Amino acid sequence: MKKVVFLLLIGLLWACKSDDVEYVNVNVAIAQVMSKTEFRASVEIQSPKPIKEAGKIYAYNNYIFINDKFEGVHVIDNTNPTSPQAITFIKIPGNEDISIKNNYLYADSAIDLVVFDISNINAITMVAQLEDVFSVYDYQLPNDIQDIDYGNYNPQTDVIVGWTIEVQQRDASFVQDFETIGFASNDSSGHQTVGTGGSLARFQIVGNYLYTVGSHEMTIFNIINLSEPTLVSTQYSGNNIETMFQADGYLYLGSTDGMYIYGLQNPENPDFISEFTHWTGCDPVVVAGNYAYLTLRGGNNCGQQESVLEVIDISNKYNPVLVATHSLENPYGLGVKGNSLFICDGEAGLKVFDKTNPLNIQWVETFNNITATDVIPLSGSLLMIGNNTLYQYSYGSNSIELLSSYQL
C-alpha cells in the first residue's frame, strides 16, 4: 500500500510540474562563425559593385570612400562632382571605419587593423595587417533579440561575422528584458595630407598617431612609419562610445550618455579632461572654436523619446556647459564649416543653420524629400549620404545648390 501511495505521489508531482511550465517563443541570435585564418585571407581588392548598406563616408583628395557596413569600402572617383564614378571595392570583412594619411588607408577589420597603399588608386595593395589589436567589436542586433547562442564560437581562433535569427521555445521564466550588447573578442616633417571623415567616425589621425575607439576602449597606434604602424596602447575611454572628433589638440568622444574630452599633450597617453552628461541618446559630436554641437536621437534603442541639438560651451575644457538646445526630428550626423552648421535629420532631410551666434543659431534652409544620415563639409562643397545615395552640394555665403545625386 505504501509503495502504491508513493508512486501515486511521484506521478502527481510530475504531472503538476509538466502542466505548470509555460513555454514562450523568443528570438534567438545564433552566431555565424569564421576561423581567423579564413577571415584574414578574405581581404582583397575587387571590381566595383552595388553597395549593400551604406555606412560612413570619408573624403581624400579627389576621392570619396564609402563604407559598406561590415563588408568593406567602395572607392569613388570624384574628380567631376557632377558625375562621380566607382573605381573599385576593397573587401574588408567586419569593416566600419577608415582614415587616410599620405596615401595610406587604415581600416578596422573586426579585431584587426589593415593598411593599404592607395598611391596608385587603380592598383591598391595591402601592406600590413595588425592582428588582434581591437579587443571589442560590435555587431548590432535587432531590438527584439531575447537570447544569444554562441554555438562553438572560440574567441581564440574564431571571429563572429554575423547572426542568424531563429524563433525558439524558452521557459516563460526566461528573462525577456534582453539588452542588445557588443561582443568581446578579443606630424613628421614635410607635407602631409590627411583625409576628412564624417561625424559618425571612430578613427582620427592627429600628427603621427591614429586614434580609434570601440564601445569602451581607445586604441592608439604610432604611424610615423605609415606602412608599418605599431600598437602603442589600449585604454578605457568611457561608456558606450559611438563617435570621435578631433579639434585643436583634443579628442571629443560622443557616447550614448554624454561627451568625453581628452587632451593630447602626451599623444601616446591621452589625458581625460572632463565629461558632459545628458540623458541617453545616440550622440555624434562636432566642434568649432569654443563650442561643441551634439545631436541626440531618441525614439529608438538609443534611449529617450526627444531628439535635439545641444550647443555646449567648451571654452573651459574642464567644465563644459550646456548653453542652448533645439528640437529636431530624427538626427544622425552633422558638420560645421565657417558659420554654417549642417544637420542630417534622417527622413526630415538635410537642415542648414547659421551659427554666427552659437547661442542663437538660425535656421536657413531644409532639403526635403531625402534621407540624410551623415555629412562632410569641405571647402566650397558638401558631401552627404543617406538611403544608399551620395549627394553633393556646392555652397557659398548665400546659396546651396545640388550638384549630383549618385545611387550607390
Image (cartoon, rainbow, N blue to C red):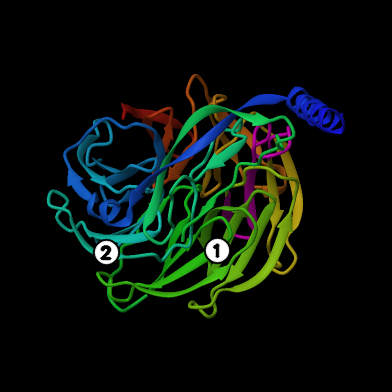
Q: CA distance from mark 1 to mark 2?
A: 26 Å
Rendered residue at 24%/46% (across/down): 90
Task: From the image, tell me which residue sits under label 2.
Answer: 102
Question: Mark 2: few, some, or many residues within 10 Å (few <14, many ≥20)?
Answer: some
Instruction: Say which quarter of the image contains residue 253.
Output: bottom right
Q: Residue furthest front?
A: 1
Q: Is residue 125 visible?
A: yes
Q: Give the residue number, with chain letter if any, for mark 1.
A: 217
Residue 220 location, x and y as percent? 45, 70
User: Of 405 and 15, which appears nearest the observer?
Assistant: 15
Amino acid type of the residue tagged 1 in the rendering: Glu
Please report whichever mark, 1 or 2, sits nearer to the chain's N-terminal start: 2
In percent of width and height, residue 39 lies at 29, 51
* Highlighted range, magenta: 285-308
Q: Quadrant of the N terminus?
A: top right
Q: Please state if 39 lies on the left or on the right of 310 as rendered.
A: left
Which residue is drawn at the image coordinates 71% and 67% (left, top)? 316
Disc on res. 18: none
Query: Which is more toward the observer, 159 or 123?
Result: 159
Q: Quadrant of residue 178?
A: top right
